[in-house]
Image: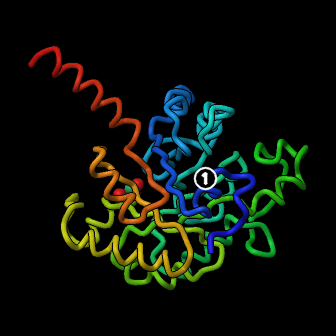
Amino acid sequence: MVTGTGEHNPVKKKLLEGKPSFGSWIQVPHPAVAEMLSSCGFDWLAVDMEHSDASVSEYSAVIRGMYARGPVPMARVQENDTLSIRRLLDAGAWGVIVPMVNTPEEAEKAVAAARFPPKGIRGTGFARANDYGVHFNQYLEASQDILVMAMCETRESVDNIEKILAVDGIDGIFMGPYDLSMSYGIPGKTSEPIMAQARRKVLDACKKAGKAPGLHHFTLTRESITNIVNEGFLFIALGVDASFIQSGAKAALLAATE
Ligand code: 3PY
Ligand code: MG
């Protein structure tokens, strides 16, 4: 099952209620980007620490741009290790999206890094997340609502999906279509039938396990988004900041020159 109650994390609450939540992706690590996207009404925003040049201090600055504006701050962490996960949680992330979780052992490693003892091995200290110690005990209790999403983005991960979902403390699966297409030997061809089969398998397994299926979705039309919601995805990242800038700029130039 999805862990926690959602009392401290509105995204988790939606997932527990089986409602879709829409987020987006920040690769340009500036607080202004978080401010701009926050005013759009996303449920959550994830800073991409894996495929950007963002540092942990930039992460803290970016999520300050979300503060009191609505979105729940998340992070796609640099890699599946305790340090990458702990430092972002200490900075104030309420969800970690962990890349390349291919086996149940790797899922256990992600959970251990993200959860305090006895569920995991996350170390504690005064940090931004607990208001530098002022809300130490409250944060320990609330931290059960931290979302831990394992990324499914290889053939191996799809093959092992039931075992990955059986790991206690994993709240759901977040599919990365680009790496998955690489793994199937069809780079970038995210609409091939094998990709739909993989999505079906992950959706069915999530349903059986009572966990949240998620996807990074890049085709930003109403029809395409309706389709993935109807397929059953609940934790949905729409696009990425850099592409929003590029597509807006291209459309403006096209309108001026065509
Ligand atoms: C992928 O498509 O591989 C991703 O990691 C998307 O975030
Ligand atoms: Mg990826």
* Quadrant of picture, ligand 2: bottom left
Q: Amino acid at mark 1?
A: Val
Say whether residue 252 is left or right of residue 50.
Answer: left
Say whether residue 180 is left or right of residue 104.
Answer: left
Q: Which residue: 53% across, 25% down?
A: 32
Q: Residue furthest top?
A: 256
Q: Quadrant of residue 172?
A: bottom right
Q: Which residue: 30% across, 45% down?
A: 222
Q: Residue furthest left?
A: 258
**Mark 1 crowdedness (10 Å alpha carbons): few <14, some 14-19, many ≥20:** many
Q: Position of residue 113 (x, y in %)?
A: 67, 67
Say whether residue 17 is left or right of residue 256.
Answer: right
> Which quadrant of the rendered structure holds the C terminus?
top left
Q: Position of residue 65 (x, y in %)?
A: 61, 30
Reading the image, the residue beneath label 1 is 11
Query: Could you say whether the residue bearing mark 1 is in a helix, strand or loop?
Result: helix
